[in-house]
Each structure stands twice: as structure tokens, then as C-alpha cells.
Amino acid sequence: MMQQTILFDMDDTLIYCNKFFDLVIDQFADQMEAWFHGYHLSIDEVKKKQAVIDLERVVASGFAPDHFPQSFMDTYEYYCNLTGRRTDPAELQRLRELGASVYGHSIEPYPYMEETLTQLQADGHDLHLYTGGDPTIQMRKVTEAGLERFFGDRIHITRHKNAEFLDGLIRSQGLDRHRTWMIGNSLRTDIIPALKNGIHAIFMPAEQEWSYNQVEVDVEPQGAYFTLSSLRLIPETIRSFTNKSFASGQ
């Protein structure tokens, strides 16, 4: 089988992420309901406002660790202004700490993470980790999840995970687009950029997805494009496709 280069997303592809954000958002909404008791705030409306504020900041300036806590504080101040309730510096600090707590959770790998990466490595593929976020936070996850033994120095972290950055990564690493795969849960930051760059893509829908990733795919694949439900299906999917391509002379 011909060696392939495989770029893996990390959050909600190899390890859980969104569910921890959802837990903290639930805590935030409960706290807002308690503070604004008597003002008839809807928990759903509070969550929607926080999501809009958070999304706007990510779209404008990429993934940064202060965005999420700041979205809690901005939402709080929005409702203070709307209702006339006085802002309290201690409450703002509480929200900052609550938002930041999401980055301290322990790592929980997706099922078959270890077995899948071990099999792909044994098959002779060149594995890269390509993740969005703050380098310090993401490298803590890499270390805690034990991913360095699979990816070595082939770990790429950016706050702006898009088609342009991926193109630069492919060029700087000298990757053959006909033998390169992107595997991830985000249509916006993994799949669409991969298809725009003419590489193969495997979409791994997250168990819990946030609005940022809910977009339409409007790019025609030039190579393989699969949707899989489990990491353990990846090695055989790549093996079958490459063997078929090799047999047909592509």
C-alpha cells in the first residue's frame, strides 16, 4: 500500500471538547437565571446570545482562550443594560473564572483513538496533527493525551484554521496532494479547506456540534470524500481507497 500523509484534527475528532463547553455554558445559564431572578430571563435566549457573541469573535479573530470567558461577561453586561440591573465586578470576575475553567478539564479520548493511530502508524502512514486554538492550551492536551508518540514534531497549531493556512502547510511540508488526507469533525475548518486544496477528506461528525461548524459544503471533491461514524473505520477506508486507486493506475 502506498504511504499516505494523514492530517488529524484534535478536538472532537481524537479527544472530546464540545461537551465540556456545553457543561460550562449550562452552568453560566443557571448562574444568570439566579442573578436575574425576577427579570424573566429565558435560559434559551441567554444561551443564544452567548453563542452569537462567541461566534462573532471567533470569526473575526480566530481561536483565542480569552474569547469564551469574555462572551460570558459580554452577555452578562448585555442583560444588565437591557434590564437596568447593576453590574457587579465580583460577578464579572466569577464569569471570567467560570469561562476559563473549561480549559482545565482532564482529557477524554474518543473511542478507538489509540488503536486507530497505532494501526495507521503500523501501516506506514505519515501522521500530522493539525489543530486550531491557543498553542499552550493545545499542547497541554497533546501531552496529556499522549499524542506526541504518534505525531512527533509534526504538530501544527493555528488560531485561524482555514483554506489559506492549510495550503501554506501543504506547501511548507512538501506534501503530495494526491496522497494527503484531512480527517476532522468541522465542515468549516477541516473538510471545506481540504476540498478547496484538492486533498482527500474524511468527515467525522461530532456527537455534539456547535453552530460555528454547521455550514454547507459547496466544494466539489477532487479526490476521496468519506463520512465515517467511528475512528476505527479509518484505516480500512484509507487502505481500500489507496489499493483501488493503485490498481486503477491513478
Image: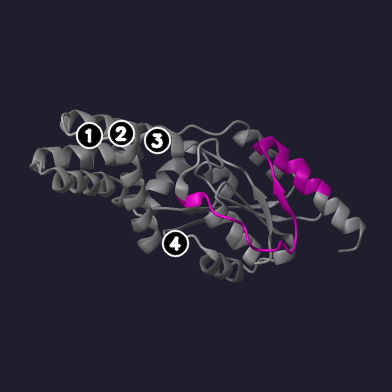
User: Quadrant of residue 158 in the image?
Assistant: bottom left
Q: Residues within 10 Å of mark 1 (few under 14, many from 20)?
A: many
- Mark 2–mark 4 Cα distance, whole angstroms, equals 31 Å
Query: Of the residues shown, which amino acid type is indicated by label 3?
Result: Asp
Choose mark 3 or mark 4, whichever is in front.
3
- The magenta region covers 212-240
Mark before the other along the chain sequence, 2 or 1 = 1
Q: Is residue 7 left or right of residue 75?
A: right
Question: Are discs 2 and 1 less than 8 Å apart at CB?
Answer: yes
How far apart are labels 2 and 1 at the CA level? Answer: 8 Å
Residue matched to label 1? 32
Give the image location of residue 201, x and y in percent.
Answer: 67, 54
Question: Residue 227 in magenta?
Answer: yes
Judged from the image, the secondary structure of the residue bearing numbered disc 4 is loop
Residue type of the residue flagged with mark 1: Met
Q: Is residue 42 visible?
A: yes
What is the secondary structure assignment of the residue under circle 2? helix
Are discs 1 and 4 less than 8 Å apart at CB? no
Circle 2 sits on which residue? 43
Q: Residues within 10 Å of mark 2 (few under 14, many from 20)?
A: some
Spatial CA span between label 1 and label 4: 31 Å
The quarter of the picture where residue 215 lies is bottom right
Residue holding disc 3: 22
Relative depth, front residue between 80 and 184: 80
Label 4, on which residue?
160
| Residue type, label 2 | Ile
